[in-house]
Amino acid sequence: MTWIREQIVPVALGDWALDLRDDDLAQIRYRGREVLRSVRAVVRDRDWATASWVVGAVDVGDDVARIPLSSGSFGVRFDGSLTVVVDGDSLSVTFEAAADREFWTNRTGLVVLHPAAVSGDPLTVTHTSGEVSQIEFPRDIVPHQPAYDIRALSSEGVTVAFEGDAFEMEDQRNWTDASFKTYNRALADPFPYLLDGPVTQRVTVTVAETLTSRPAPDESGGSVRPSPTSQALGELRLEETGPVTFSVGASTAPGAGSADPVGHDTLVEVDLGWAGWPAVIQRATASGLPLDVRLVLPLEAAEQALEDAIAALEQVPLAQITAFQPPTHPHEHMADDESLRLLRTALGARDVPIIGGTRSHFTELNRGQHLVPPGLDGVAFSTTPMFHTREVLQLEQAIGMQRLIVQQAVRIAGCPVHVGPVSLRAHLNNVATTDPPRPSVTDLSEGYGPELLDADDERQRDPELATWTIASAAALAVPGVASVSFFEERGPRGIRAAVGSDYPVADAIRALAALEGPLVTARDGEVWAIGSAATMLIANLDEISRAVRIGEASVEVGAKGWVAVGSEGDVA
């Protein structure tokens, strides 16, 4: 089986080719060499939600492709088009769109993705004034924009010119996207802004003849791999990582539900700004496992709210605890000096490990690392592979980027790192300009948190998610990481359905949770492995079966599948 995939339409225009993945012009190639990961037209509302395009009948000629677009998102009618024109060594993409009424937007226009493989390459930036800067694509994941006020970008034989607005760049590896994104309109400009007329923007890509004379870069997550033709035998070289525990989060779905303990503890996020928070704690304790408690403070009366929460947790075994600032606080979603001082006061003499960090993405930890107090027992952050796009390509390429962000997080933290929740879609909208949605009741009949957001993905039920989860665990389990929490106990974002029946990913989580003692990890291309002295879990993200060798044992792993291998080389 394979993932539930987006529609993919190959488009060939002269020496150029690309894959139309729904509305995304993906993996743009010149004579077989990828030059851009993507060009896409986006419409974002005032909370950064993204309009869904409906793609009309695509018209492809010898050197022109026309892609009609329409959308009814946000109660507004958008009509637009992408026109792709090639002329020898250049390709241009023109986006034209209009709305049927005025619309408040944070961004409407083109975005361009360079593949992560260009990290470290020299970069020439031509600004709107005509001035030129010589920099490079960042090696480490940078918290802020590496380039501003862009009219053109040139690197290693590829030049990208932008028309219709000023553009700037961000390092999307922060969100585990395998790309650097150049987007229209500076974030320093006021937003949302009123879209009250048509939009026209153009991106032109020009390549030098020297481009195809160099070997394609070896990278994790950016370039097009040749079509597999063999089952090459690879040897897994094991790297020690130390002990890591695995678990799942408390369900945020409606109803009571049954609890089947899985893992070391249960991660539960408690919004103290909602009067129904005691029900969240009560249901989370049904697992019988210690709780990893992430308290979200209210904007007002935070001291009293913390005292009440700690009182409610008095008889509950706690693995660790933290307190995050509310969304509208200047240090939103971070556990800073102030929030942790209040937490310590509320805890009094109770001896519980106190962690810090962010309830949001690695991005916020990277940007707010100066807010992490010293002397913590750990630092946490969450991660999702599909913050910016829902493509299967992005989902799978995120694995390599997870390894990068967690290595950098360990350097930032200087203490044990706790990764979670790991979820397919973001469990909060950390960039919303309006208040987060909360239930209208104080029980759990409506669910809470992610249940009230656009946070579900049908791939939660796919067999391939089990493989992805094993690979993700192997990527995230680096020295310095103490724990990883995946998904939820049950419900549409869980390891089992609301009624209690397992999704395929449940077996993968149980296998990870059963690993004991110091762990080792390995990687061979699209194959990732994690294990202990007793058991190795091997995940194959490739499109074909792969034969791999561990010591003296040879194991075949099916396409998009995973296996558990015992210490004697036997497959469980």
Image (cartoon, rainbow, N blue to C red):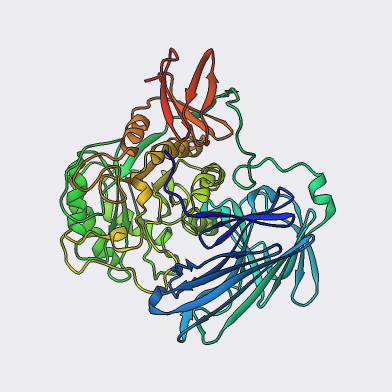
Q: Is 103 on the left or on the right of 36, as rendered? A: left
Q: Residue at x 15, y 51 (%)?
A: 256
Q: Position of residue 447 (x, y in %)?
A: 22, 59
Q: Position of residue 174 (x, y in %)?
A: 55, 54
| Furthest residue in direction right, as rendered | 210
Q: Residue at x 19, y 54 (%)?
A: 311
Q: Using the image as rendered, state which of residue 122 and residue 410 is in the foreground.
A: 122
How many numbered discs, if any?
0
* Residue 413 vertical placement versus 63 (above, below): above
Q: Using the image as rendered, state which of residue 353 and residue 431 is in the foreground.
A: 431
Q: Using the image as rendered, state which of residue 214 and residue 137 is in the foreground.
A: 214
Q: Is residue 36 visible?
A: no
- Quadrant in which the C terminus appears: top left
Q: Is residue 20 visible?
A: yes
Q: Is 256 on the left or on the right of 543, as rendered? A: left
Q: Position of residue 251 (x, y in %)?
A: 25, 50
* Residue 375 vertical placement versus 367 (above, below): above
Q: Residue at x 79, y 60 (%)?
A: 89
Q: Position of residue 9 (x, y in %)?
A: 55, 55
Q: Residue at x 77, y 41 (%)?
A: 215
Q: Is 148 on the left or on the right of 294, as rendered? A: right
- Quadrant in which the N terminus appears: top left
